[in-house]
Image (spheres, rainbow, N blue to C red):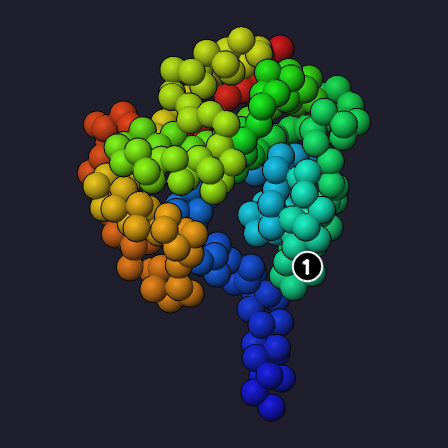
C-alpha cells in the first residue's frame, strides 16, 4: 500500500513539474554548480543542446524540459546506462538522445547546436584543443557555450589535491586566464570566467567530503547547501575558488 501511494505521489509531482528536481541530488556542490553555470541564461523552446560528458545525466532531464532537443554524450557505457535509467524514472517531457561516444567520433554536423553545456568535464580531457575545435565547429554562430571545471585554487593541502586528482582523473586544474585564452583562440567572444565556492566554509566542507568520496546524505546536504549559498553572496570580490564557470559566444 505504501509503495503504491509513493508511486502515485511521484507521478503527481512529475505531472505538476515539481519532479525531477535538482534538490534530489545529494551533492550540494553539484546543485550550486548547476545553478551558477546557468544563472542569467535562458533556454529557448527552439534550442538544440549538446551535453558533453553527461555522466549519470540528472542535469539533462532538467534541461530537456525547456529545449526542443537534447543530445547527451559520454564515453562510459555504464554512465550512459545510468543516465537512461534516471531519465526513465523522471521523464522530462522531451526524449533525450543518449549516445556513448567521444565528441570527436560523434559525427555531428557543422552548426548543429544552439547551446553546448558541460559540467566539470574539460579538466579530464587530454586532447582539449581538438575537442574545443569541434565544439566551435558544431556550435552555431552566436551559439552559447557553458561549462564548469575544477580549479582547486583555494586548496592548499597537497595530500588532498593529490587525492582529488587521482580519484577524479584530473588532467588539468585551470585558472581563469588560461580558460579565457583557450576560448579566445578557438573563435569565442563575450567570454566570462568566474570562480565559485570561494569561501572558507565551502573549502572545509569539500575537503572533509573528499575522504568519503564526496558523498552526502539525502537530507544532511541541505545545511551545507544553504550555508555555501549564503557564503557566496559575500565573496564577490574574491577571484579564486574551487570551481570555475565559463560562458562564451561563438563568433561569426
Q: Quadrant of residue 53?
A: top right
Which residue is drawn at the image coordinates 36% and 51% (left, top)?
A: 211
Which residue is drawn at the image coordinates 73% and 50% (left, top)?
A: 95
Position of the N terminus, as image quadrant, is bottom right
69 or 132: nearer the eye? Answer: 132
Q: Is residue 227 left or right of residue 72?
A: left
Q: Quadrant of residue 86?
A: bottom right
Residue 26, position as x, y percentages in the image: 44, 58
Q: Is residue 148 left or right of residue 70?
A: left
Asked whether the viewer can see residue 227, the reply is: yes
Which residue is drawn at the image coordinates 48% and 61% (left, top)?
A: 24
Residue 190, position as x, y percentages in the image: 46, 16
Residue 161, position as x, y percentages in the image: 36, 35
Q: Is residue 72 left or right of residue 14?
A: right
Residue 144, position as x, y percentages in the image: 56, 26
| Residue picked out by circle 1 | 85
Identify the secondary structure beneath mark 1: helix
Amino acid at each position: 500500500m505504501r509503495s503504491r501511494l509513493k508511486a502515485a505521489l511521484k507521478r503527481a509531482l512529475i505531472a505538476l513539474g515539481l519532479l525531477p528536481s535538482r534538490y534530489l541530488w545529494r551533492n550540494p556542490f553539484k546543485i550550486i554548480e548547476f545553478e551558477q553555470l546557468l544563472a542569467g541564461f535562458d533556454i529557448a523552446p527552439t534550442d538544440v543542446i549538446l551535453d558533453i560528458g553527461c555522466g549519470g545525466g540528472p542535469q539533462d532531464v532538467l534541461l530537456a524540459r525547456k529545449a526542443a532537443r537534447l543530445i547527451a554524450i559520454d564515453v562510459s557505457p555504464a554512465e550512459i546506462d545510468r543516465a537512461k535509467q534516471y531519465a526513465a524514472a523522471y521523464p522530462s517531457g522531451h526524449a533525450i538522445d543518449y549516445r556513448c561516444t567521444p565528441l570527436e567520433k560523434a559525427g555531428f554536423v557543422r552548426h548543429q547546436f544552439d547551446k553546448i553545456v558541460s559540467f566539470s568535464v574539460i579538466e579530464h580531457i587530454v586532447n582539449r584543443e581538438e575537442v574545443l575545435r569541434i565544439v566551435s565547429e558544431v556550435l552555431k554562430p552566436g551559439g552559447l557555450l557553458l561549462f564548469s571545471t575544477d580549479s582547486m585554487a583555494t586548496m592548499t593541502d597537497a595530500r588532498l589535491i593529490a587525492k582529488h586528482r587521482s580519484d577524479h582523473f584530473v588532467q588539468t586544474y585551470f585558472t581563469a586566464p588560461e580558460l579565457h585564452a583557450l576560448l579566445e583562440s578557438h573563435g569565442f567572444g563575450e567570454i566570462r570566467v568566474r570562480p565559485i565556492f570561494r569561501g572558507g566554509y565551502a573549502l572545509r566542507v569539500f575537503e572533509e567530503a573528499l575522504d568519503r568520496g564526496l558523498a552526502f546524505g539525502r537530507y544532511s546536504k541541505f545545511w551545507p547547501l544553504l550555508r555555501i549559498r549564503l557564503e557566496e553572496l559575500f565573496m564577490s570580490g574574491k577571484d579564486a575558488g574551487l570551481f570555475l564557470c565559463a560562458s562564451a559566444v561563438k563568433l561569426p
